[in-house]
Image: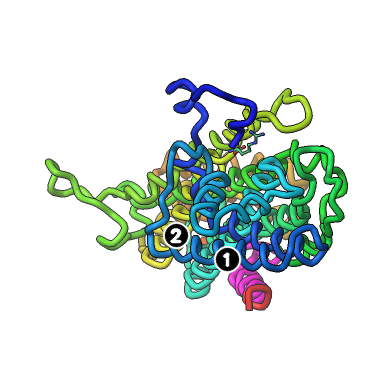
Amino acid sequence: MWGGRFSDKPAELMQAINVSIGFDRRLAAQDLEGSRAHAAMLQKTGVITSEDAAAILGGLATIAAEMDAGSFPFREEYEDIHMNVEARLRELIGPAAGRLHTARSRNDQVALDLRMWVREACDRTHAQIRALQKALIAKAEPNAATLMPGFTHLQPAQPVTFGHHLMAYVEMFGRDASRFADARTRMNESPLGAAALAGSPFPIDRQMTAHALRFDRPTANSLDSVADRDFALEALAAAGITAIHLSRLAEEIVIWMTPQFGFIRLTDAFTTGSSIMPQKKNPDAAELVRAKAGRMLGSFTQLAVVMKGLPLTYSKDMQEDKVPTFEAFDALELSLRAMAGMIADLEPVPERMAAAAGAGFSTATDLADWLVRELALPFRDAHHITGAAVKRAEQLGCDLPALPLAELQALEPRINDGVYKVLTPQASVASRMSYGGTAPDQVRAQIERWKEILA
Ligand code: ARG
C-alpha cells in the first residue's frame, strides 16, 4: 500500500508484530458497511464518478458474499481488515478500487468500525440483560413469600424472602442495562470523515455518512475522532460492573448448592460430575461465570493502560484496543446467557430455606422492635434486653420463639405472651411493609413494577 515510499519488504518480525487480520477480521461487516456509505457519499458529492461508485459498490457486494460464504481470502500480507478488503476489491474491479480511499484514512476507518462493533455489542448485551432480568422475575414471582435467611457478613441477619433476594439482582442488572444504554447514546457519533487526523480537503458530507450509518451526528473534532477510544472503555467499564454483579450471583449459587446450605437444586443441565467422586454434582457454570469477571475487568484495565499517556492523535498502540474489547463482550454475552439459563433451571428447597431462616436468632431485631413499640423502651435498652434473651436462649439450647415467657420476664417483667406473635420468620417478613421491604406484598409490588418496565 505504501510501495511508493518503500523499496524493501518488512522484516518477518515486523509483520508478526504488526499484523492484526487474525483478530480485526471480526470488524469485516462494519468495515464493508462503512465503505458502502463512504462510496455513496463520494459519488453524491461528485468526488468520484457514478461509474466508479457503481464498480466499487458491486465489488463490495461480491466481497460481502464471499465473507458470508466463507470464501473471502483473509491474507496476513495485507496486515489488517481494511487493507484486505481494499486489496480484494482491486483484484475484483481493478483500478477504480483505489478511489474508495479518497478522503478517508485507516485512522477514521478503524475508529468507525470499532465504534459500530461496540454499539452493536451494547445493544446485544442490553437485550441479554433484559432476558436475565425476566428469568429472575419469573423465579421471584412464585417465591415472593418463600422464606430464607437474609445475611450480613454471611451471618444470619433477618429473615427475608427468596423472591426479594432475586429481585435485588433485578435492580442491579437494571442499572447495568441503563449503563449500556447511556454509553450507546454517548458513542453514537460518526468519526468517518476525520480522515487521518485533520479532516479532508474534499467536499465530503459527513452528515450523510453519519445518517446512513445510523449515527445521531458526526463527531465535531477530527483529532478527537481518531485519537480516543473512550467509547470502548466506557462499554468495558459497564461490562466490568455487570460482571461483578454476575459474579456475586454466581457465588451465591455456588454457596446455596452446597449440601451445608442446600437452599437450591440445579439440574444436570448446569452441573457436572466428578471423574473420581461419584457423589459429586458441581456448579461449574456458576463458577465459570464467577471467574469470567476476571477476564472482563482485566479487559478494561488492558485497554485503559494502552490508552493512558498516548499523545494525540492516532498511535499504533491503539490497534491493541480490539482484543480486550472482543474478549470482554464474548465473555459477558456467554455469562449473561449461562446465568439466565441457571436461574430458569434452579429450584429452591423451601424447607431448607425456611429452617435456616428461623435459625441463628434471626428474629432478634423483631423482639427489640416489639419492646420499643409495646413497652415504649428506647431502642438501645431494647437492644440490650434482646441481647440478654439471645444469650439465655443459647444457654438453654433453644431458639427465641421457644424461650419460655418466664425467662423473658426475668429480663423485663412487662413482657407478655403477645411477643411470640412477632418472633416467627413469617411474622418478621410480613411486618417489613416499608417501601422496598421484604414483606411478600412489597415484593409482589416490585415484581409488577418491573414487569411493566420490561413489557
Ligand atoms: N490496523 C490498524 C488499527 O487497528 C488500522 C489503523 C492503522 N493506521 C495507521 N496509521 N497505521 O489501529
Region rendered in magenta: 429-450
Please name the residue shown 63% across and 74% down the image. Answer: 454
Q: Position of residue 372 (x, y in %)?
A: 73, 53
**Which coloring applies here?**
rainbow
Q: Is residue 442 magenta?
A: yes
Q: For this rendering, which residue is in front, 21 or 71?
A: 71
Which label sits on residue 148? none
Q: For this rendering, which residue is in front, 315 or 136?
A: 315
Query: Element under label 1?
Result: helix
Please name the residue shown 51% across and 46% down the image. Answer: 84
Disc 2: which residue: 67
Screen quadrant of the N terminus: top right
- Alpha-carbon distance for marks 1 and 2? 26 Å
Disc 1: which residue: 127
Taking 253 as reference, is 199 above or below it? above
Please name the residue shown 47% across and 44% down the image. Answer: 393
The answer to whether 42 appears left or right of 86 in the picture is right
Q: Is residue 391 visible?
A: no
The answer to whether 424 appears left or right of 230 in the picture is left
Asked if marks 1 and 2 touch (Cβ < 8 Å), the reply is no
Instruction: Name the main secondary structure of what is drawn in magenta.
Output: helix
Please name the residue shown 32% across and 46% down the image. Answer: 260
Q: Amino acid at mark 1?
A: Ala
Q: For this rendering, which residue is in front, 451 or 208?
A: 208
Screen quadrant of the C terminus: bottom right
Mark 2 crowdedness (10 Å alpha carbons): few <14, some 14-19, many ≥20: some
Q: Position of residue 76 (x, y in %)?
A: 44, 38
The answer to whether 328 appears left or right of 175 in the picture is left
Pointer 2 residue Cβ closer than 8 Å to ligand 1: no
Mark in front: 1 vs 2: 2
Q: Is residue 210 visible?
A: yes
